[in-house]
Image (spheres, rainbow, N blue to C red):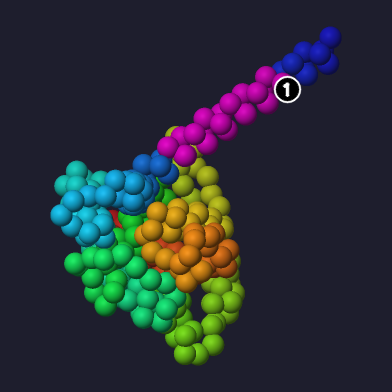
């Protein structure tokens, strides 16, 4: 009898744990979805303008207008602060510079017409990078992210700069992304990120969070190229899946994004605590 009662109690406990875990997963997913508001608007705009052509202006120019309006609304509504806007604008410029260089080197192209293009690159493209920074800022606030054993500033900045420069220099010199990835693992080996979901705090290795975000951006990249956001050479005749190796590029770019956002949050946190 006692054994039966104990087994029933264990089953109830297990059932309660499963229900709690599912509720936490749904809550986490909802917070992530809200944090992805800017990227979702971009993807929705890519899809709608592909299906329903808009009048008067080329598609790329309409996408720029939509992105500008969305950015204005994000700040106006209080979803993003002015300091976060500065970081997001920095990412827009970083991304645009990378886009101009990569299209010049033939890595990908923007085949459609547009009035607002810089050296063949539509200005809306910078917002795709800015939306990654927007996601990080939103998720940081919503999930109350905290960093444990964050590396020194003098290590973080040169690492971020080296990762970004390698996107340019590997066209003329050897690609050192594997060495940089190994260096990232070494630098962040003891670093953890903690976050809160419905009052409960969780944690994961910081390097793992980089990989997960990079992987989901790769999925988003496939959606974006499907709707004609840009075009790789092997997608000229027909759309095909973006090479899985691009995940490593996105992981490295996420690291640059994360390091800049983290630096902003830490500086603001120190200023607020004074």
Q: Residue at x 19, y 47 (%)?
A: 73
Mark 1 neighbour class, 10 Å CA radius: few under 14, some 14 to 19, many 20 or more:
few
Residue that label 1 marks: 10
Identify whether 233 is placed above or below 202.
below
Q: How many numbered marks are there?
A: 1
User: Which residues fall within the magenta stretch?
Assistant: 10-30
> Can residue 239 be seen by looking at this rendering?
yes
> Can residue 156 be seen by looking at this rendering?
no
In this picture, residue 225 sits left or right of residue 125:
right
Which residue is most to the front?
A: 237
Which residue is most to the bottom?
A: 173
Mainly helix, strand or loop, the magenta region?
Answer: helix
In this picture, residue 64 sits left or right of residue 222:
left
x then y, percent, for residue 40: 36, 47
In the rendered image, the quadrant that contains the C terminus is: bottom left
x then y, percent, for residue 49: 30, 50
Closer to the camera, 194 or 173? 173
x then y, percent, for residue 16: 61, 24
Q: Residue at x 47, y 39 (%)?
A: 28
Closer to the camera, 194 or 213? 213
């Amino acid at each position: 009898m006692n054994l039966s009662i104990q087994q029933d109690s264990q089953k109830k406990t297990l059932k309660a744990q499963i229900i709690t875990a599912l509720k936490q997963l749904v809550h986490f997913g909802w917070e992530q979805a809200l944090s992805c508001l800017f990227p979702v608007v971009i993807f929705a705009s890519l899809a709608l303008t592909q299906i329903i052509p808009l009048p008067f202006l080329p598609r790329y120019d309409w996408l720029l207008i939509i992105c500008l309006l969305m950015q204005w609304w994000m700040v106006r509504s209080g979803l993003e602060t002015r300091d976060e806007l500065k970081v997001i604008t920095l990412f827009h410029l970083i991304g645009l510079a990378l886009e101009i260089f990569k299209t010049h080197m033939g890595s990908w192209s923007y085949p459609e017409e547009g009035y607002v293009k810089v050296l063949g690159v539509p200005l809306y493209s910078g917002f795709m990078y800015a939306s990654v920074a927007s996601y990080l800022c939103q998720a940081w606030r919503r999930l109350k992210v905290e960093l444990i054993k964050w590396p020194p500033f003098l290590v973080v900045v040169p690492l971020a700069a080296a990762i970004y420069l390698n996107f340019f220099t590997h066209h003329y010199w050897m690609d050192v992304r594997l060495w940089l990835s190994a260096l990232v693992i070494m630098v962040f080996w003891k670093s953890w990120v903690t976050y809160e979901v419905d009052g409960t705090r969780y944690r994961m290795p910081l390097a793992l969070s980089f990989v997960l975000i990079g992987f989901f951006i790769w999925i988003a990249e496939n959606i974006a190229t499907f709707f004609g956001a840009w075009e790789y050479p092997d997608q000229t005749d027909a759309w095909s899946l973006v090479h899985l190796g691009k995940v490593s590029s996105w992981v490295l770019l996420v690291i640059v994004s994360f390091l800049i956002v983290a630096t902003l949050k830490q500086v603001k946190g120190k200023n607020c605590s004074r």
